[in-house]
Image (cartoon, rainbow, N blue to C red):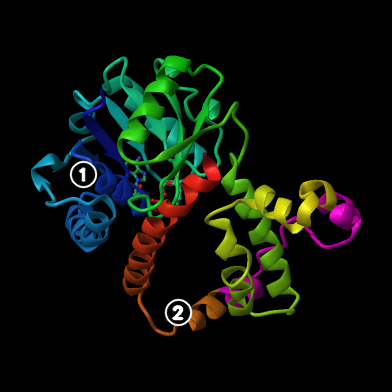
Amino acid sequence: MIKKVAIIGAGVIGAGWIVRCLAHNKKVIAFDKDIKLKKKLLSEIKRTWPYVKKLFNKKKLNLKNFKFATSIKEALKDVDFIQECVTENYKIKINLMSIIGKYSRANAIISSSSSGLLPTKIYSKCKNPERTMIGHPFNPVYMCPGVEIVPGKKTKKKFLNETNKFYKSISMNPIMVKKELSGYLSTRLQEALWREALHIVNEGYASTKDLDRSIEDGPGLRWSLMGAFLTFHMAGGKAGMKHMLRQFGPALKLPWTKLKAPKLTKKLSSKVIKGTGHQAKGKSVALLSNIRDKYLVNLLKMRKKYENKIRN
Ligand SMILES: NC(=O)c1ccc[n+]([C@@H]2O[C@H](COP(=O)([O-])OP(=O)(O)OC[C@H]3O[C@@H](n4cnc5c(N)ncnc54)[C@H](O)[C@@H]3O)[C@@H](O)[C@H]2O)c1
């Protein structure tokens, strides 16, 4: 059983894994090349705890289970599982994985939080690549149960199964991707939506706010219970997907999407940054995160009542 976890890289995602693991009584040792992060991390753990406590019905935060290491060697000593969360960049991850392979126990599992990089490439210089994979979470990791497990070409099934068990033990719903692909599943879907949104802003059809509302008040409401396929099945009326494809199939050929990304010019960046700044209405990211977390606790608790009816 996995009891001791190392989190390497303690930014947004690393902090999220730390909180989720602590909430499930795992021993956590973190390392970041920025040693000064320790203080920020402790305040993030304290900020998120009230929400995590409520979501997982926990009583007390046991900070004795948490340690911030001063070297990577110290962080990797004797851990069962390593969750890597450093900057999304092949060169950085490949170098780091060769170090992690060298200093970790030979059968310790290594999982990368990457959002879309190929595992076979990330672990190309890592010792014992059969124990390596992607475990792609969603922000905020302490709230969102989703995680995509993606094997590399050399990954052994036994380690995938152990990882699956571990993620379930920290209240996650792992999705086993059959073989590696860039962007995995959800990043691919989100990227397609994001590209269309950037085209629409770039060409001046709508503001960032109106585009967000078009998701928040429609598809977004449904998507947390049912994804695109099941949602469209119902859009076909009594005959379900069969009628949906008959009616909307021809639209696939209409110029409704552009998909190729627009050039991220200074003008487009500034429109997007100004637009989202305006939407935030002066609220800090920390304040927005608190509002989101409170909402997610209630939403996830409420969803529990309905998801079993759909999924089982
Ligand atoms: N932000 C998201 O929404 C999100 C969601 C899912 C997955 N991810 C993935 O998680 C990973 C981390 O993303 P993030 O958003 O937390 O980034 P971040 O910039 O918030 O944090 C990255 C951290 O890694 C540290 N770091 C960089 N190189 C290091 C090294 N060699 N050794 C130790 N520490 C190092 C940095 O100091 C920084 O604190 C990326 O692979 C990203 O694709 C991000």
State which quarter of the image contains the N terminus. Answer: top left
Viewer-closest of 95 and 116:
116
Q: Which mark is residue 22?
A: 1
The part of the image, by quadrant, that contains residue 185 is top right
> Who comes first in sequence, dot 2 or dot 1?
1
Q: Position of residue 262 (x, y in %)?
A: 72, 62
Is residue 262 inside the magenta stretch? Answer: yes
Residue shown at the point (74%, 58%) measured from the top left: 235
* Residue that mark 2 sits on: 280
In this picture, is 85 found above or below 52? Answer: above
Question: Element type at marker 1?
Answer: helix
Taking the magenta stretch, the answer to whether it contains residue 10 is: no
The label on residue 96 is none
Residue at 63% across, 64% down: 219
x and y, in percent, of residue 311 in the image: 53, 42
Q: Quadrant of residue 47?
A: bottom left
Q: Regarding mark 2 in the picture, which secondary structure is present there?
A: helix
Q: Amino acid at mark 2?
A: Ala
For badge 1, the amino acid type reads Leu
Position of residue 139 relative to residue 131, above or below, is: below
Q: Which residues are magenta?
A: 244-272
Image coordinates for residue 120, horizontal then vertical, percent? 54, 25
Residue 49 visible at all: yes
Q: Is mark 1 within 8 Å of ligand 1?
A: no
Q: Single out the residue that lies furthest toward the left.
A: 64
In the image, 297 versus 211, the foreground residue is 297
Real-space Cα separation, disc 2 to disc 1, in angstroms: 31 Å
